[in-house]
Amino acid sequence: MKKRAGLGIYLSGLCFLIGCGGKVENKINQSIEDNQSAKTIVEWDSSSGHPEVIFGEWRNQAAESESEKEKLMSEVCEKLIGLSGQSLSIFEEEIRRESNQFFIAGCKDALLQRLDEYFAAERSNLSVQVNALRSQRSSNNFKFQDNVQLRDYSKGYLAYSGDVAKKEIVLTFDDGPSDSYTRSILRSLKEVNAKAHFFELGKAVRLNSEITKLVAADGHMVGSHSITHSCIGNLKECGRANGGHQYTFDAAVAEIRGGHQAVYDVLGWVDPIFRFPYGASAPNLRNYLKMSSTGEFYWNIDSQDWRAQSNSHLIHNTLAQIEARGLGIVLFHDIQRRTAEILPEFLRELYTRGYSVVLLQSSDPKLKYNSKLIRKKLP
């Protein structure tokens, strides 16, 4: 879950003072519309119709009285159960969230069954199928050749395409580790000898430290992505995404250092790479990374896997961008179920089309043990 507490409190207070109006159905329809119309992930995450926001409003309303709780239980369940599987997938994280169970308990099992049926139907359209919620291999039986390339991160490094050659792709996964989906992604990568770069959130690392260890054990790069996924740069949308305020330089640095520290505390090292949440940086923050001998990773191929869409559309859209550019850095998120389920087929398509998967390691192997962004524990 990204940091939306400030926005949630603001909206809930506004609802209390003036009344949010809008029935449950309107809120659900707004969420679906916003997910489909958002041009960027920061626009989606800062939407007042984001599921995390509207479920927060409903939790507050349900806590007011037993009658309000019963009314919400009935309305929310009725409207969610009537959605298509693709639309319902927008709300899966909130359906599973423990804090929401007291007012959707009556329909949770039915909703999860609908979601399982939807994802099963989506998998049936793939040649290579895996259920991300189960420990299972795919039918892939090929191997990518090792392609480890060295980059000098000691004076900073801005990776947009990764400076790779034609037909070379860098795979990146943000926002994990996920207790639900990262293991599946690791299995799919390991089957075909594909290495990736994981930009992990500090708060997720501390919750799922054993999964971070699995990522490292499989030979992937492990960098950070801040502590909370707050929008810490100077992107104009950052104020809205953060509930109305911009981060100061010191607060932004604390987010950067805290994410790196979490990985270091678990592994005893952290690769010298960082990705700004939403790609929202600032000149002074970029200079700080440069002075800290840390590479900044952006991307030139955006899967938009946060958007509710069919498996075939996600694969087609991502591959179309790859073919148009011929090389570069692909942005995925290992917190997305559909990403975990399309990954085996996506990897097979890359292999079939003659692409190589590149790992961009530091030219100084000692750098990850001596990051300037962390505090080492005293002996």
Image (cartoon, rainbow, N blue to C red):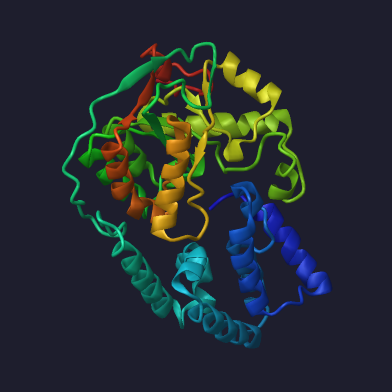
Residue 337 pos. (x, y %): 40, 56
Which residue is at 51% across, 21% downward?
295
Residue 23 pos. (x, y %): 69, 80
Which residue is at 33% across, 43% downward?
210
Q: Is residue 98 visible?
A: no
Left or right: residue 276 versus residue 149 is right
Which residue is at 51% across, 53% downward?
306
Find residue 378 and report its image quarter. top left
Vertical placement of residue 164 versus 68, above or below = above
Q: Closest to the observer: 172 or 144?
A: 144
Left or right: residue 245 versus residue 376 is right
Which residue is at 77% across, 65% downward?
13
Vertical placement of residue 56 versus 262, above or below = below
Residue 271 pos. (x, y %): 42, 24
What is the tally of numbered marks visible in this picture?
0
Vertical placement of residue 93 versus 350, above or below = below
Vertical placement of residue 55 versus 373, above or below = below
Left or right: residue 339 versus residue 18 is left
Residue 12 pos. (x, y %): 72, 66
Q: Closest to the observer: 96 or 119?
A: 119
Q: Quadrant of the C terminus?
A: top left
Which residue is outermost to the right?
18
Q: Is residue 182 visible?
A: yes
Q: Closest to the observer: 215 or 22?
A: 22
